């Protein structure tokens, strides 16, 4: 009996020992897992909080704030110089193939939301910058100390970001944005600006709304939104472009409006004659000051865009919904130039599209802006104009060529022959002079007569159509267009 009891006691003690060991192991595992999770969580939070703001960024930001406060004009008032080789002005980061995912409601952890606003000066609305602005063109934009990587050569990314932030949230220069990108890893070693910078911009400067899409139709839906009809979109769009209308490599541009199917583009590397090359002329882009106007269809056909990042126009959103006027106009003082496509610009009595028209201004007219309110600029007592049609750089109309009567020129292309200079009556080959018949053909398009390229043309008379930017000349066989589509057809 005693042996049986001893066995039972030994068995119970063994069971208790085993359970205590299991319990001890379970506690050890639990502690280990909890500690690992805590360490990883802390590390992740630390990484998200670590936005580097260098002394250089703080200095440039402070200088910008002071300049804006003293009513200095910080926008670019010049066009970029014509490059010897446009292929040298490229940002390959704009065409990276990944991350083309619809993000109608991207989520943020909120760690850095709005912290960048301390770097901003007062916002005065739509602002254009050029990456080739002489103030910073040769400043470095590099993460590897490469002196060939400059603002002019590869900073379309930070320049576009600075335009969006300055137009919507508050004044910031491209150089400030560029240094932020370099300090925080958005400037790649040799491939320009990474796509990841765009969500950083949305979060860091606390935009009310932000979307990303690769769909042209989705992008246009936002760009066409203009509730108070001041000509400026309720959303700004950064577009990445592959080789095509805007670049021979990779490039970022900003879209600021879509009025009646015509997109207004702020190209950070806009130079004189950029869209007059043989490969781009068909798009029909019109440049006025620092704005490039292109139809939706041409943008879609020739732009070769890859992705779009959409930001709410929060400065415009401060306007009252009733009356379309801002609660308090912001005083300023700088020169602007009327930059319409071709028509005159309406001057209104107040900052509203429904206000009475009190006058008009011709394209290229010089004005002094004394205050801004939403998408409107004050240019005198009870005189307001849409900021969308003002340029910091002078607006020059292309001078149409003249042709000397009695002089003989050579055609550089095929030209149709007309009975008059309004293109209403076409001529047939049989109606031309004997000499004209030798140099004409009717095999192009239809039975109408055309002069072949290389034909000698003697000028008898000329007619200049300034509205359509055409120059007609009369020769012995009839009238031809000697200049149209920004092209001189005679040499």
Image (spheres, grey):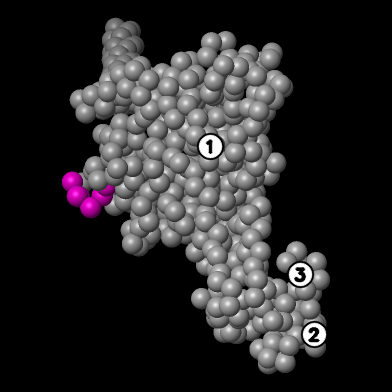
- Which corner quadrant holds the N terminus? top left
**Residue at the far front in the pictured view:** 406
Mark 2 or mark 3: which comes first in sequence? 3
Q: Which mark is residue 393?
A: none
Mark 1 or mark 2: which comes first in sequence? 1
Mark 3 or mark 1: which comes first in sequence? 1
Q: Residue at x 44, y 40 (%)?
A: 393
149 within the magenta span:
yes
- Magenta highlight: main SS: loop
Report which residue position mark 3 lands on.
420
The image quadrant that residue 412 belongs to is: bottom right
Question: Compared to 455, does 225 lie above or below?
Answer: above
Contact? badges 1 and 2 (CB < 8 Å):
no
Report which residue position mark 1 lands on.
365
- Front one among 42 and 471: 471
403 within the magenta span:
no
Report which residue position mark 2 lands on.
431
Question: Compared to 399, does 366 lie above or below?
Answer: above
């Amino acid at each position: 009996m005693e042996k049986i009891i001893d066995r039972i006691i030994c068995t119970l003690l063994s069971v208790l020992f085993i359970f205590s060991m299991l319990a001890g192991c379970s506690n050890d595992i639990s502690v280990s897992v909890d500690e690992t999770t805590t360490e990883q969580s802390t590390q992740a939070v630390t990484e998200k909080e670590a936005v580097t703001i260098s002394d250089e960024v703080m200095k440039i930001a402070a200088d910008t704030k002071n300049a804006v406060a003293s009513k200095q004009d910080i926008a670019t008032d010049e066009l970029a110089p014509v490059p010897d080789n446009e292929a040298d002005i490229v940002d390959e980061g704009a065409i990276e193939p990944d991350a083309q995912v619809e993000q109608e409601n991207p989520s943020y952890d909120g760690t850095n939301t709005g912290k960048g606003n301390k770097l901003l000066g007062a916002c005065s609305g739509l602002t254009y910058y050029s990456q080739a602005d002489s103030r910073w063109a040769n400043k470095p934009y590099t993460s590897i100390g490469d002196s060939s990587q400059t603002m002019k050569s590869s900073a379309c990314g930070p320049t576009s970001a600075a335009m969006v932030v300055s137009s919507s949230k508050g004044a910031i220069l491209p150089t400030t944005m560029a240094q932020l990108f370099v300090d925080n890893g958005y400037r790649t070693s040799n491939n320009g600006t990474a796509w990841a910078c765009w969500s950083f911009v949305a979060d860091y400067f606390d935009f009310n709304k932000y979307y990303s899409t690769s769909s042209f139709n989705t992008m246009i839906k936002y760009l066409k939104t203009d509730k108070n009809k001041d000509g400026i979109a309720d959303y700004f769009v950064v577009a990445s472009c592959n080789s095509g209308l805007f670049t021979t490599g990779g490039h970022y541009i900003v879209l600021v409006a879509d009025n009646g199917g015509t997109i207004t583009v702020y190209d950070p590397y806009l130079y004189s004659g950029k869209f007059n090359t043989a490969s781009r002329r068909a798009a029909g882009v019109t440049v006025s000051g620092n704005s490039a106007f292109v139809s939706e269809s041409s943008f879609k056909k020739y732009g070769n865009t890859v992705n779009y990042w959409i930001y709410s126009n929060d400065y415009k959103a401060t306007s009252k919904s009733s009356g379309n006027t801002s609660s308090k106009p912001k005083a300023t003082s700088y020169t602007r130039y009327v930059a319409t496509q071709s028509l005159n610009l309406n001057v209104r009595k107040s900052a509203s599209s429904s206000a009475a028209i009190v006058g008009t201004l011709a394209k290229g007219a010089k004005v002094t802006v004394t205050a801004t309110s939403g998408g409107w600029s004050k240019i005198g007592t009870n005189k307001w104009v849409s900021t969308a049609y003002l340029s910091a750089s002078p607006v020059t109309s292309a001078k149409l060529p003249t042709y000397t009567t009695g002089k003989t020129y050579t055609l550089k292309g095929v030209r149709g022959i007309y009975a008059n200079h309004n293109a209403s009556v076409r001529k047939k080959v049989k109606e031309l002079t004997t000499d004209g018949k030798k140099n004409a053909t009717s095999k192009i398009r239809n039975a109408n007569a055309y002069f072949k390229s290389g034909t000698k043309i003697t000028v008898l008379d000329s007619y200049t159509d300034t509205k359509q930017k055409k120059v007609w000349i009369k020769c012995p066989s009839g009238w031809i267009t000697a200049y149209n589509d920004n092209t001189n057809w005679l040499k």
